[in-house]
Image: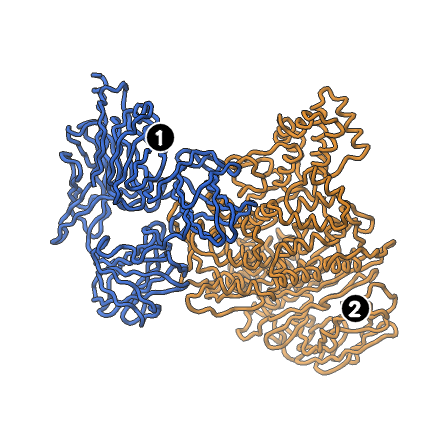
Amino acid sequence: MNGRIAGKFPNLQFEPRLSDCGIAWGALLWCALGAASHAAEPVRIEVFPTTIKLAGLQQVSHLIVTGIESDGGVLDLTNSAELVSANKAIAKPQAGRIVSIGDGSTEITVRIGDLETRVPVEVVQCAVPNRVSFRFGVLAALSKQGCNAGACHGSPSGKGGFRLSLRAYDPSIDEHSLVRDAFNRRTNLLEPEQSLLLLKPLMKVAHGGGHKLRKADLAYEVLRGWIDQGCQADPAEQPQLVKLDLYPPVRTLHAPHFTQQLLAIAHFSDGSVRDVTRLTVFTTSDSGVASVDELGRVTGHDRGESVILARYLEQFATTSLTFLAEVPGFAWNNPPEHNYIDHHLFAKLRQLQILPSDLCGDSDFLRRVHLDVTGELPTPDETNAFLNDTDPTKRAKLIDRLLERPEYVKLWALKWADLLRVRSSKVSTGGVYKFHHWLVAAVRDNLPYDQFARQLLTAAGSTFVNPPANYFRSAADTDDCTETTSQLFLGIRIRCAKCHNHPFEKWTQDNYYGIAAFFTRVGRKSGPTPEEQIVWLQRGGEVTQPRTGKQMQPWLPLSGSIDLPGEVDRRQTFVDWLTKPENPFFAKVGVNRLWAHLMGRGIVEPVDDFRDSNPPACAELLAALAEDFVQRGYDCKHILRTILNSHAYQLSSRVTELNAKDAKYFSHAQTRLVPAEQLLDAICQVTGAPEKFAGMPAGTLATELPSPDGSNDFMRVFGQPARETVCACERSSDANLSQALQMINGPLVQAKLKQNDNRIRRLVQANKSNPEIVSEIYLAALCRRPDEVELTTATQHIEKASDRILGLEDVCWALLNSNEFLFQH
Amino acid sequence: MKRLALAWVAVALLPKASWSAPSISQVEPVSLSPGQAVDVTFIGGELTGASGVWTSAPATVAITPDLEGNGQKADRVTYRITLAAEVPRGPVGVRVVTPGGISNLRLLAVTERPSSMDKGPNHEKSPVIVALPAAVDGHIDAENGRTFQFSAGTGQRISFDVWARRLGSPLDAVLRVFDAAGREVAYLDDSETTGPDPRGSTVFATAGDYFVELRDVRYRGGGDYAYHMRFGDSDLPALPLPLVAPGVGTSVPEIMEQEPNNLPEQAVAAAIPGAMNGRFEVPGDRDYFQFEGKQGQRWLFIGQTREFGSAADLLMRLYKPDGGQHAEAEDAGVDEGVLDTTLPADGIYRLACEELNRRAGSDYVYRVNVQSYSPGFVLVVEQDKYDTPQATAFKTKVNVRRRDYNGPITLAVEGVEGLTLTDNVLGEGANEIQLTMTPPAGLVPGSINTLRIIGTAKIGETEVRVVANTTEALKRACNGLPYPPPALDGMIALGIALPPKQEEKK
């Protein structure tokens, strides 16, 4: 049979094998260090791989050809290189790839103009018939074509009666579906081309998923070949896939040379390697910067950075590509660096030729830092004092003062209460208040972040007596603990891996249940009082992986499985690992949250979604912040102070021509809607009409509320989270029509404006003039005095009004509805 | 234990159209000192013509004289109560009696130090200044707290002990101590030993004035949100070990653990039936006891911790003579752990006791009461008080939880002479009964009566006698108090109301 196959499919190209390529990864790393300027012609060329070994007939290897310019810059010349074989009976070039023809050794000459280099090629085992691997051929082909994607046959119930495991995470399901399910109707061993498996994606038979396969695709050849070979299962001794490499791992490209061919190489447990580029799925992290086609060809579209994620079965690899282009008019103006933040961030901006905005003015800074640190606006007196202060260090001094204010404490307690799901349905009504106070005390005492995590993750006892135990009340089962802990402290959204290997990341189902093994012994029982719950440590209990039925050992990311015999509290081991200074996740996730709060966007964004395919905007900055965090004993206040004092934080929100398109690299302050609670408090401050919350003492601020349990339409409309999830994304910052209606004609704003003893009426009673009142409203709302035009316009409006109070209310209403008030800037 | 101090008045002459049982929503103060006369005001409804106060501890009670309209008001009445000098610290139950019946139960704290009454409102701007040691009674208003000011010396340890939930108050108290600059220097909320009632001590590093804020954790409040707060100038006493004083509260051998006994081979010899006692001294402490057992013996190992105010959550594991684990028990909710097991072989068994979360400290004390298992039953009465017109029958539901006994159970009543029962036999297998009780005509309206329902049965050759408990009713009466005072359990108050026709005669 094998002989028949070999004769029938002479062009079958799959399982390409490369052995001993002589890949000098380290030596080629310099390619990433592309120079800022671009030279026109290469002075040298390099080829990867430097040697080729192909095992079997018609096996293929790509050759990546790189031109080295005189200044060290690089450009991809793969598509323009001339390839010449010294012996075409052994190997020959074909469509830019090297194809094995017969056993023996030869050499490929790679030529670019006058430049050339040679690549030795060895071909073996051409007489051995090729076997199509079910796993490495068929399943990879189905993944490549998207057949087993979540929206297609990889959904839990499949599509059209045909179910595949999501992205081939479970070969046994796939084998059953393809070979035995539906009375074998999907494969036709007598006439492979008539197999439903081929006819449907070719659209020879109606297919809801559309035209997914072409005869020219390698996937077609692989699937047809496998059917023709009798739909054989893989032998038990087949080597395992252990790693995927992507070449080049990192590269900087200069306009106009914005293309790069990628090469995906799979490593197997027997030491062999194979070029799997044509069966690898490629995706880009930023399609605005670069796109990648199905053959692994990257095309840059704009300045910036993009990570290309390659997935071959369950293995992932990434390439980080930077695209640089000369920007007319760009000249680095050497803005002062206040600290290491500016050093790293400005280096990135300079490399990308994005010029930062100017430093913001005192008014903007005052308003911004007050809202960011305390959640409140400064009073008019505070604003006047700051604006009149001529001390050159007044910003730093203000930052120090604000970080010691009680409002700082309640604002950060609010942020953590959001993430820890402090609401009555999760932790009981009494628990809300007790847990919230614990958070307040933790922030007030500047509890080091590692201790904060430790107290939460190792908590036990009564949720009322020991409030951190509520962590295990809101995370009410082992799965929830696994997902919550991963997302909160590791920045890993691992939920997908509960049911199958993570479709976009390297986390597997085994990993999920390995982490779960740390939390499976957490028990919960009723407490002495009805609302109370007791968290306790069971002396035994293991986690079983539902797909394999295997009992899982505790597993730590990047460390592996560990043996923890006996009745130990496994959570201690987890936290010991988590809070080690060298932990690659913990400190970075922590500082990223702090950064995102102040800068409006995480260095990694979303803040709790760290993955290879979602790279940091400035990896050096993130690393430096994390290192500082660790060295300073996980002192959150220190990091906040460092960021606040940076030049980067104090940049203006006004964009320039040289940074207008930047929404990622912090070249200017990011304007964003003031969060719900802060906005409500700000309206109360400006109008001088405090809000009274049911059941809470008079004077309680919205930011002080321990939970969102009391219904407040205004805050809900402005994105107050319900605290149902641990995702920071639950707090919405999107603008919507309801918000406009609330501000323009909503009952809350109207009531504040009309309240008898509000700011306007108090000022009128104090015999203040219209300009004085207008100025104070401007100071209260915008932290600045009105300019001449504003003051004149407002005063004239008041004077023309039939009722002076009404006119003043109009002015205040207009300011409350201005973007300058509604947005943090 | 009859504590009747009745000031009987001519109820028939009172101008009232109809009579309803009295109710109490608020008591001021909520503490009594043994041997000291205290005027206690009961606030509630239907208190007109109050004829007396029932107390669960020995006391003399008289209506307070010289108060205008005292005894004639529906919403309040004041009695002078003098507890007997020998009454120990702890809660004591009180009820007000009127011609309409008997009121709901309220608990008062018995304390050696007289309290001052916090009349409020006092807050951070106008705190009440107290000199230590001190005790204050009062209630918390909604959305507000109470603030007290005291002085502390450098390095002085000061204790705080709030009684609220332990008195059946709905107050979920939180106590915060601030320095003069407004910095929080201590925060006390729930405690492992006292539940929602804050209890603890703190050392003040700096001499100066300090401020205590007491409030409900959820900012709730009202007249019934009562509290009794003690400020001590020393640390709080640790729990005693053993929890039950030998020869006083127990008749079985009380075995004490002796460290080191963390390993099986270090087990302390114990006799069963008996009680094993210990304290978890250091985190992860494990105490082994050993005893000789016979194949087929069935024993109950009853853990006792929180009902005595211990912080311990007890985990018990029983090991066979061959060293293998035989059984395990830990408590859940308010139920203390019970290990009910039949021994599989003759030999030396070891009982390992440890704290469920491996915690330790002076308050982590435990007692394991080991009893031989025997068939029996538990009786449960759903109410802790009944009101009925004079000489008029009333019904009460009694539930039964049987334990390997399915035979008949005969019910009787103790405490009220002449009270007759009908339908007082629970038939074979029956799990509930509507018991009809008729008080004697001699029980007059306004009289104070308490009774207990007793069940008896002959199980094998043994006459078994069981007092019906009212635990759940007491919990309800005391705002969910998880461990009501044991002395009150099973004690049913009976109020006798004026019959309707008597009002017509008038």
Q: Colour of chain B?
A: blue
Badge 1 marks a residue whose secondary structure is: strand
Instruction: Classify residue A427 as left or right of residue A275.
Output: left
Nearest the viewer among B256 and A462 is B256
* Percent of width and height locating residue A766: 68, 26
The residue that mark 2 highlights is A78
Disc 2 residue type (three-letter): Thr
The quadrant of the rendering that contains the N terminus of chain A is bottom right
The 10 Å Cα crowd at callout 2, few under 14, some 14 to 19, many 20 or more, is many
* Percent of width and height locating residue A321: 74, 62
Which chain does the residue under circle 1 lie in? B
Tell which residue pokes out farthest to the left in this image. B461
* Percent of width and height locating residue A765: 67, 25
The residue that mark 1 highlights is B43
Instruction: Classify residue A353 as left or right of residue B195.
Output: right
Q: Is residue B81 visible?
A: yes
The 10 Å Cα crowd at callout 1, few under 14, some 14 to 19, many 20 or more, is many
Q: Colour of chain A?
A: orange
Badge 2 marks a residue whose secondary structure is: helix
Which chain does the residue under circle 2 lie in? A
* Percent of width and height locating residue A297: 74, 63
Up the image or down, B257 lies above or below A414; here it is below
